[in-house]
Image (cartoon, rainbow, N blue to C red):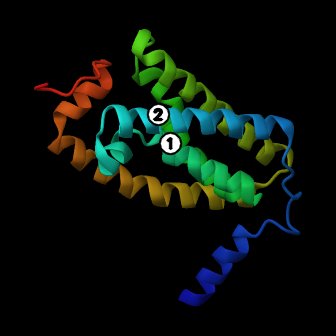
Amino acid sequence: MKMQAVARFREGLDTEGREAKFKRNVAGWTLIVLNGLAAFNSTFFFLAVLKVGIVGWLMMNTCAPSIALFVVGFLLGSPVVMVAASVPMIRYGTAGLFAFGWDAYNLIPQIGHILMTLAVIYVMLYIVRNRAWRMLVLGLALGLAVLLPFTVLQTWWFNAHPEMLEMLFSGDWAFPGQ
Protein backbone atom coordinates (compact mmCIF):
# COMPACT_ATOMS: atom_id res chain seq x y z
CA MET A 1 0.00 0.00 0.00
CA LYS A 2 2.80 2.39 0.96
CA MET A 3 4.70 1.65 -2.26
CA GLN A 4 1.53 2.28 -4.28
CA ALA A 5 1.15 5.68 -2.64
CA VAL A 6 4.76 6.56 -3.46
CA ALA A 7 4.32 5.38 -7.06
CA ARG A 8 1.11 7.41 -7.45
CA PHE A 9 2.85 10.48 -6.00
CA ARG A 10 5.75 10.12 -8.45
CA GLU A 11 3.26 9.59 -11.27
CA GLY A 12 1.50 12.77 -10.21
CA LEU A 13 4.76 14.72 -10.44
CA ASP A 14 5.07 13.60 -14.06
CA THR A 15 3.15 16.13 -16.13
CA GLU A 16 3.55 14.33 -19.45
CA GLY A 17 0.39 13.15 -21.11
CA ARG A 18 -2.21 14.47 -18.67
CA GLU A 19 -2.62 18.18 -18.92
CA ALA A 20 -0.98 20.39 -21.50
CA LYS A 21 2.80 20.18 -21.28
CA PHE A 22 4.29 23.15 -19.51
CA LYS A 23 6.00 25.55 -21.91
CA ARG A 24 8.44 28.17 -20.72
CA ASN A 25 7.76 31.64 -22.12
CA VAL A 26 9.20 35.15 -21.96
CA ALA A 27 7.00 36.14 -19.02
CA GLY A 28 8.17 33.09 -17.08
CA TRP A 29 11.83 33.67 -17.86
CA THR A 30 11.44 37.33 -16.84
CA LEU A 31 9.93 36.31 -13.51
CA ILE A 32 12.68 33.74 -12.98
CA VAL A 33 15.43 36.30 -13.59
CA LEU A 34 13.85 39.07 -11.49
CA ASN A 35 12.91 36.76 -8.61
CA GLY A 36 16.37 35.18 -8.79
CA LEU A 37 18.00 38.59 -8.50
CA ALA A 38 15.75 39.50 -5.56
CA ALA A 39 16.61 36.20 -3.83
CA PHE A 40 20.32 36.72 -4.45
CA ASN A 41 20.11 40.28 -3.09
CA SER A 42 18.29 39.25 0.08
CA THR A 43 20.59 36.27 0.61
CA PHE A 44 23.64 38.53 0.28
CA PHE A 45 22.09 41.01 2.72
CA PHE A 46 21.35 38.43 5.41
CA LEU A 47 24.51 36.35 5.03
CA ALA A 48 27.16 38.93 4.10
CA VAL A 49 25.88 42.19 5.60
CA LEU A 50 24.00 41.04 8.70
CA LYS A 51 26.04 37.84 9.05
CA VAL A 52 23.13 35.91 10.58
CA GLY A 53 24.44 32.49 9.49
CA ILE A 54 22.61 29.86 7.47
CA VAL A 55 19.98 29.08 10.11
CA GLY A 56 19.27 32.77 10.76
CA TRP A 57 19.05 33.39 7.02
CA LEU A 58 16.64 30.49 6.54
CA MET A 59 14.42 31.61 9.42
CA MET A 60 14.45 35.32 8.54
CA ASN A 61 14.59 35.16 4.75
CA THR A 62 12.29 32.31 3.81
CA CYS A 63 11.51 34.13 0.58
CA ALA A 64 14.81 33.11 -1.03
CA PRO A 65 14.42 29.33 -0.58
CA SER A 66 10.81 29.63 -1.75
CA ILE A 67 11.99 31.39 -4.89
CA ALA A 68 14.68 28.73 -5.38
CA LEU A 69 12.01 26.03 -5.34
CA PHE A 70 9.96 28.01 -7.87
CA VAL A 71 13.02 28.34 -10.13
CA VAL A 72 13.70 24.60 -9.89
CA GLY A 73 10.09 23.86 -10.81
CA PHE A 74 10.26 26.23 -13.77
CA LEU A 75 13.55 24.82 -15.04
CA LEU A 76 12.26 21.24 -14.65
CA GLY A 77 9.02 22.22 -16.37
CA SER A 78 7.05 20.98 -13.36
CA PRO A 79 3.92 22.96 -12.51
CA VAL A 80 3.49 20.71 -9.45
CA VAL A 81 6.79 21.96 -8.00
CA MET A 82 5.93 25.55 -8.97
CA VAL A 83 2.57 25.25 -7.18
CA ALA A 84 4.37 23.76 -4.16
CA ALA A 85 6.69 26.78 -4.18
CA SER A 86 3.67 29.07 -4.46
CA VAL A 87 2.45 28.00 -1.02
CA PRO A 88 5.38 29.57 0.89
CA MET A 89 5.57 32.37 -1.68
CA ILE A 90 2.02 33.37 -0.78
CA ARG A 91 2.78 33.06 2.93
CA TYR A 92 6.03 34.99 2.89
CA GLY A 93 5.79 37.05 -0.31
CA THR A 94 2.18 38.09 -0.74
CA ALA A 95 1.52 38.26 3.01
CA GLY A 96 4.79 40.18 3.36
CA LEU A 97 3.21 42.99 1.36
CA PHE A 98 0.90 43.56 4.33
CA ALA A 99 3.21 42.55 7.20
CA PHE A 100 6.12 44.87 6.37
CA GLY A 101 6.10 48.63 6.06
CA TRP A 102 6.70 50.61 2.89
CA ASP A 103 9.36 52.95 4.26
CA ALA A 104 12.91 53.33 2.98
CA TYR A 105 14.49 50.10 4.27
CA ASN A 106 11.52 47.95 3.36
CA LEU A 107 11.10 49.09 -0.26
CA ILE A 108 13.58 46.57 -1.66
CA PRO A 109 12.04 43.59 0.17
CA GLN A 110 8.59 44.80 -0.87
CA ILE A 111 9.67 44.77 -4.52
CA GLY A 112 10.72 41.16 -3.96
CA HIS A 113 7.31 40.41 -2.42
CA ILE A 114 5.59 41.89 -5.47
CA LEU A 115 7.74 39.72 -7.76
CA MET A 116 6.88 36.62 -5.73
CA THR A 117 3.19 37.45 -5.98
CA LEU A 118 3.52 37.85 -9.76
CA ALA A 119 5.18 34.42 -9.91
CA VAL A 120 2.25 32.88 -8.00
CA ILE A 121 -0.19 34.55 -10.42
CA TYR A 122 1.86 33.18 -13.34
CA VAL A 123 1.54 29.62 -11.99
CA MET A 124 -2.15 29.97 -11.20
CA LEU A 125 -2.86 31.28 -14.69
CA TYR A 126 -1.20 28.17 -16.11
CA ILE A 127 -3.28 25.94 -13.82
CA VAL A 128 -6.57 27.63 -14.71
CA ARG A 129 -5.89 27.91 -18.46
CA ASN A 130 -4.94 24.24 -18.67
CA ARG A 131 -7.46 23.03 -16.10
CA ALA A 132 -4.58 21.30 -14.37
CA TRP A 133 -6.53 20.63 -11.18
CA ARG A 134 -4.61 17.47 -10.31
CA MET A 135 -1.33 19.41 -10.49
CA LEU A 136 -2.87 22.09 -8.29
CA VAL A 137 -3.94 19.59 -5.62
CA LEU A 138 -0.60 17.73 -5.67
CA GLY A 139 1.37 20.98 -5.55
CA LEU A 140 -0.70 22.38 -2.70
CA ALA A 141 -0.31 19.14 -0.74
CA LEU A 142 3.45 19.12 -1.31
CA GLY A 143 3.78 22.82 -0.46
CA LEU A 144 1.75 22.47 2.74
CA ALA A 145 3.68 19.34 3.73
CA VAL A 146 6.84 21.46 3.70
CA LEU A 147 5.41 24.76 4.97
CA LEU A 148 3.51 23.55 8.04
CA PRO A 149 6.40 21.83 9.86
CA PHE A 150 8.75 24.61 8.80
CA THR A 151 6.40 27.20 10.29
CA VAL A 152 6.51 25.33 13.61
CA LEU A 153 10.34 25.34 13.55
CA GLN A 154 10.39 28.99 12.55
CA THR A 155 8.05 29.91 15.42
CA TRP A 156 10.26 28.06 17.90
CA TRP A 157 13.34 29.82 16.53
CA PHE A 158 11.78 33.28 16.75
CA ASN A 159 10.52 32.54 20.28
CA ALA A 160 14.13 31.75 21.19
CA HIS A 161 15.39 34.87 19.35
CA PRO A 162 12.74 37.59 19.84
CA GLU A 163 15.32 40.32 19.18
CA MET A 164 15.70 38.98 15.62
CA LEU A 165 11.95 39.15 15.06
CA GLU A 166 11.95 42.73 16.33
CA MET A 167 14.82 43.61 14.02
CA LEU A 168 13.10 41.98 11.05
CA PHE A 169 9.81 43.80 11.45
CA SER A 170 11.12 47.13 12.70
CA GLY A 171 13.38 47.72 9.70
CA ASP A 172 16.19 48.57 12.14
CA TRP A 173 18.91 46.39 10.62
CA ALA A 174 21.34 46.56 13.53
CA PHE A 175 21.72 43.68 15.92
CA PRO A 176 20.46 44.42 19.41
CA GLY A 177 23.34 45.24 21.73
CA GLN A 178 25.61 46.49 18.92
Residue 1 figure quarter = bottom right
The label number, if any, that marks residue 42 in the structure image: 2
Callouts 2 and 1 close, C-beta under 8 Å: yes
Crowd tier of the residue under label 1, counting other residues whose Cα lies within 10 Å: few below 14, some 14–19, many 20 or above? many
Horizontal arrangement in the rendering, residue 30 relative to residue 82 (left or right): right
- At 15% across and 44% down in the image, what residue appears? 160
Residue at the farthest front position:
48
The answer to whether residue 78 is seen in the rendering is no
x then y, percent, for residue 146: 46, 58
Q: Which mark is residue 64?
A: 1
Q: Residue at x 57, y 49 (%)?
A: 68
Q: Residues within 10 Å of mark 2 (few under 14, many from 20)?
A: many
Q: Is residue 114 above or below residue 20?
A: above
Amino acid under disc 2: Ser
- Local SS, label 1: helix
The first of marks 2 and 1 along the sequence is: 2
Q: Mark 2 to mark 1: distance in Å? A: 7 Å
| Residue at x 45%, y 12% (from the top left corner) | 102
In the image, residue 161 above or below residue 104: below
Place residue 10 in its image quadrant.
bottom right
